[in-house]
Amino acid sequence: MTTRLFTVLVVSLMVLAGCLGGGGPAAGDGTDADGGGAEPADRDDLSVEATDRLLRDAGSFTATWSYSTTEGGETATITNAYQVDLRANRSLETFTMSGPDARTDFETFVADGSAYTRYETDGEAFYQVRPQDDTSFQSAIDRGTLSYESVDDARLVGTETFDGVTVDRYEYSDLSTWRQIGAGAFGSGGNVTVTDFTVVILVDGDGLARQTAWTLTGETDDGETVAVEWRYEVTGVGSTDVPDPDWLADARAQGSNAST
């Protein structure tokens, strides 16, 4: 990954996370304001508290968070995924940062009061073993907090299938706020005109937001297209298993050698 592209990704992540975390883009005069007569989303159904309860009741789930920046024809992506089995008190977190020239990964498996982490960079693996209570459930929920900051003005546009269940699809698009942010949103050194900003929320029959995603597209003064995409998905609700990773024996062996 080029240094410039990586910088754009990190800066964009910090800037946009701060903007959404502060309450989300302003609405009211968005391009979907009429919504074809559709009803706006019910904020109570999409609250973080409801999600916490629904996932605890389900007993297991997989939460995947990703953030991508595209500039100059190159895409850099950060992906953070959690497989959580509350009944077995086991979890597996996977973090991947990828781009055209490099890739860095780590996985953390938590079971029986221990956390086993595998780091990989440039094809070489390293391991760490430490005592740890399982906090992956709340970590997974925290990764999705931003998905609940911008739903008030979303409009119901139809139904579809996601991860094998029927979901209601809510959308909204609001350019006004993002045009004010401009280049800062992309981490670019030049001016950026925002051409599209769209939020999509997929909600199942229990009121659980299975997917929240937004895309932000712009154009530089030189005519270059730049884009940012943020996505949070909950899948395998009630059906996620967390088996031992295939590298667990290596991690235990390294941990044993380090303690002797």
Image (cartoon, rainbow, N blue to C red):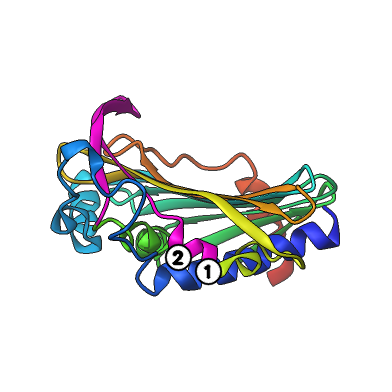
In the displayed structure, does residue 94 sit left or right of residue 258? left
Q: Which residues make up the magenta segment?
A: 153-180
- So how many labels did they put on this image? 2
In the displayed structure, does residue 99 sit left or right of residue 112? right
Quarter of the image holding residue 158? top left
Nearer the observer, 147 or 94? 147
Q: Name the residue that disc number 1 marks.
A: 180
Quarter of the image holding residue 236? top left
Q: CA distance from mark 2 to mark 1?
A: 5 Å
- Report the residue at 70% width, 64% height from top: 191
In the displayed structure, does residue 229 sit left or right of residue 133? right
In the displayed structure, does residue 205 sit left or right of residue 155? left
Mark 2 touching mark 1, by CB under 8 A?
A: yes
Q: Position of residue 102 (x, y in %)?
A: 82, 50
Say whether residue 168 is magenta.
Answer: yes
Q: Secondary structure at mark 2?
A: helix
Estimate how packed mark 2 is, as few (under 14), some (14 to 19) or many (20 or more) residues with alpha carbons within 10 Å.
Answer: some
Residue 134 in sight from this viewpoint: no
Nearer the observer, 239 or 162? 162
Residue 6 in sight from this viewpoint: yes
The circle on residue 6 is none
Q: Amino acid at mark 1?
A: Gln
Q: Position of residue 222 (x, y in %)?
A: 80, 52
Nearer the observer, 98 or 179? 179
- Report the residue at 15% width, 42% height from top: 206
Q: Amino acid at mark 2?
A: Thr
Q: Secondary structure at mark 1?
A: helix
Q: Position of residue 76 (x, y in %)?
A: 71, 50
The circle on residue 177 is 2
Quarter of the image holding residue 138? bottom left
Estimate how packed mark 1 is, as few (under 14), some (14 to 19) or many (20 or more) residues with alpha carbons within 10 Å.
Answer: few
